[in-house]
Image: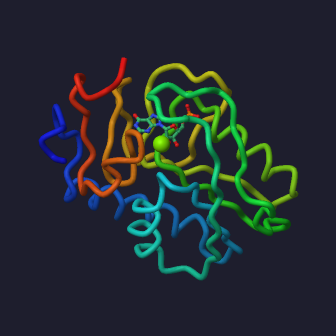
Amino acid sequence: MQEDLERVLFDEATIFRRLDQLAAEISAEYHNRELTVIAILNGSIIFMADLLRRIPLPLKLDCLSVASYHGGTVTSGEIVFRQIALPDVQGRHILILDDILDSGTTLAAIRAKLAAEEPRSIKICVLLRKVKGRLRPVDADYVGFDIGGEFVVGYGLDYMEQYRNLPCIGVLRKELVAA
Ligand code: IMP
Ligand code: MG
């Protein structure tokens, strides 16, 4: 798998150092508040597991599954919620966790859906944020790393459901990405 990468952007030690900082910020902010973390499947699973174990607060964890990509590297723009019932968020402080903020389509749709359930507050935490312009007006309150426009895999991020289990984050070799 590692040989399919053109270059490594963040190795495991670098990711873990950043998670220590993010977890400290989040812990300070949500101290004494009713925190519910909503992790977006499948991309945030590994990030979520490593981040939450660094947050020594009582919290509830729920997951949401959405689909938008249908296999390519460009978002289709349409978000489908896969579960029947939404997590119970009313009156709670919500922190949404996702792998990457790209066009913003996914997170804008999720935030709007959860906001309609009247939580106390909603914030967004992403491992990665692409610097290029969003299609939707959404930003993250906590960001692991800002990156350029390239397509990345590893540490939860996939290309056609592969590479999620790579311990680092890297840029996939161009010839492996379908045009
Ligand atoms: P958005 O709706 O365009 O912001 O896209 C968000 C989703 O697209 C993420 O949750 C990822 O699943 C996927 N995605 C966007 N960019 C990348 C990338 O560079 N590598 C892997 N997945 C990506
Ligand atoms: Mg994906």
Q: Does residue 74 lie above or below 112 as drawn?
A: above
Give the residue drawn at x 75%, y 57%: 121
Horizontal and vertical percent position of residue 23:
44, 65
Residue pictured at 78% horizontal, 43% vertical: 112
Q: Residue 125 placed where, x, y %?
A: 54, 51
The answer to whether 9 appears left or right of 100 in the picture is left
What coloring was used for the rendering? rainbow
The image shows a total of numbered marks equal to: 0
Q: Is residue 60 above or below residue 149?
A: below
Residue 52: x, y in percent? 47, 71
Of residues 3 and 13, the one drawn nearer to the viewer in this rendering: 3
Residue 150 lies, with reference to residue 115, above or below; the image says above
Front position in the image: 45 or 84: 84
Horizontal relation, residue 102 to residue 147: left or right: right
Is 109 on the left-hand or right-hand side of 56?
A: right
Horizontal side, residue 41 vs residue 22: left or right: right
Q: Residue at x 32, y 42 (%)?
A: 153
* Quadrant in the picture for the C terminus: top left
Quadrant hosting residue 149: top left
Q: Nearer the viewer, residue 170 or 159?
A: 159
Point out the residue furthest to the left here: 3
Q: Considering only vertical position in the picture, is 54 above or below 74?
A: below
**Residue 59 drawn at (x, y percent):** 62, 77
Which residue shows up at 61% across the image and 37% down it? 68
